[in-house]
Amino acid sequence: MTEIKDTVNHDADKDSNGDNHFGFQSVKTEDKAKMVRDVFDNVASKYDIMNDAMSLGVHRLWKDSLIDTLKPFPGMSHIDVAGGTGDIAFRVLDAVRKKTDDPEKLAKTNIAITDINEQMLNVGRNRAIDRGDMNQFKFFVGDAETLPVEANTYDSYTIAFGIRNVSRIDVALRDAYRILKPGGRFLCLEFSEVILPYLAELYDKYSFQLIPKLGEIITQDRDSYQYLVESIRRFPKQEAFTTMIKDAGFEKVSYRNMSGGIVALHSGWKI
Ligand SMILES: C[S@@+](CC[C@H](N)C(=O)[O-])C[C@H]1O[C@@H](n2cnc3c(N)ncnc32)[C@H](O)[C@@H]1O
């Protein structure tokens, strides 16, 4: 059986020697972004199918919960970072549409989707075209650490299952703070620490034994999904990540566990 606990360092995004990590592998910080980009290049076309298969569709509920917390409104200016194939951005627009069908108000609603990976964005663009919504979104390539966006631009910033892939998480959090308007909200959905002991054991077995196999069958890429499960274990626990969000300048910082801590929704405000 895969040995998990001894190799895990939940409380840091760097190794003790200052290097970064790619799953359980130690890598140089400057190499990590390219390795992550390769992972998502490989899986982009099957990414959405794999999400449903791995989570048995539950990722949809986690994402819906993020949107319920965000409470999108007509005329808002929103950015979804590490937005991949557009799932969060589409939900933001759907929530706005529930509040208004006035074309003028919809035209003033500005929803940006950015990602370091062009292939993932291309899948997202195609989905937006299929929805007939291409005009509602602005897609652009951007690294969460250095977004090509002016300070104080957005009312809200979301990042779902993206931040654990970022090489320097503290830098990305500070950039999130920079581009939010005063009063703006930061929301991050990320895999976290399972807090129910019986579930933790089951989840470990499921993650390490089944997910890479599913990856192999569905995407013919076992390694990318091995990285996925390892990167989840390397990500800081709920409390440690809460501290990082506070350190970036956010206030009223809180989090909520979902599915026993498999995922946590973190929130902070720029005040
Ligand atoms: C697991 S996917 C999540 C996609 C989408 N947010 C979702 O919830 O379905 C992670 C995404 O993070 C992107 N990513 C990784 N590192 C990034 C970085 N430094 N800046 C921006 N995006 C990044 C990847 O390209 C990938 O699309």
Image: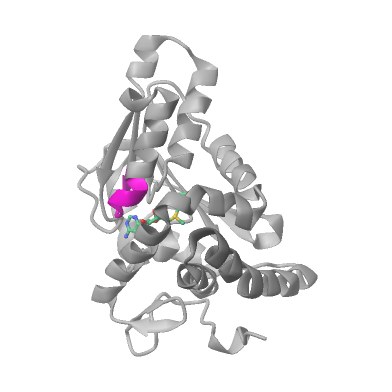
Horizontal placement of 211 versus 124: left or right? right
Looking at the picture, tell me which residue is in the foreground, 173 or 49: 49
Residue 39: image quadrant is bottom left
Looking at the picture, tell me which residue is in the foreground, 36 or 176: 36
Residue 260: image quadrant is bottom right
- Asked if residue 217 is positioned above or below residue 139 in the image, the reply reads below
- Asked if residue 123 is positioned above or below residue 236 in the image, the reply reads above
Horizontal placement of 201 versus 175: left or right? right
Quarter containing the C terminus = top left
The residue sitting at 39% across, 46% down in the picture is 83
> How far across and down, in percent of the image, does residue 77 sit?
35, 31
The residue sitting at 45% across, 76% down in the picture is 23
Quarter containing the N terminus = bottom right
Residue 33 visible (yes or no): yes
Q: Is residue 210 magenta?
A: no
Looking at the rendering, the stretch of residues picked out in magenta corresponds to 114-121
Residue 155 visible (yes or no): no
> How far across and down, in percent of the image, does residue 29 sit?
28, 76
> How far across and down, in percent of the image, does residue 89 sit?
43, 36
> How far across and down, in percent of the image, does residue 22 sit?
40, 76
Looking at the picture, tell me which residue is in the foreground, 64 or 157: 64
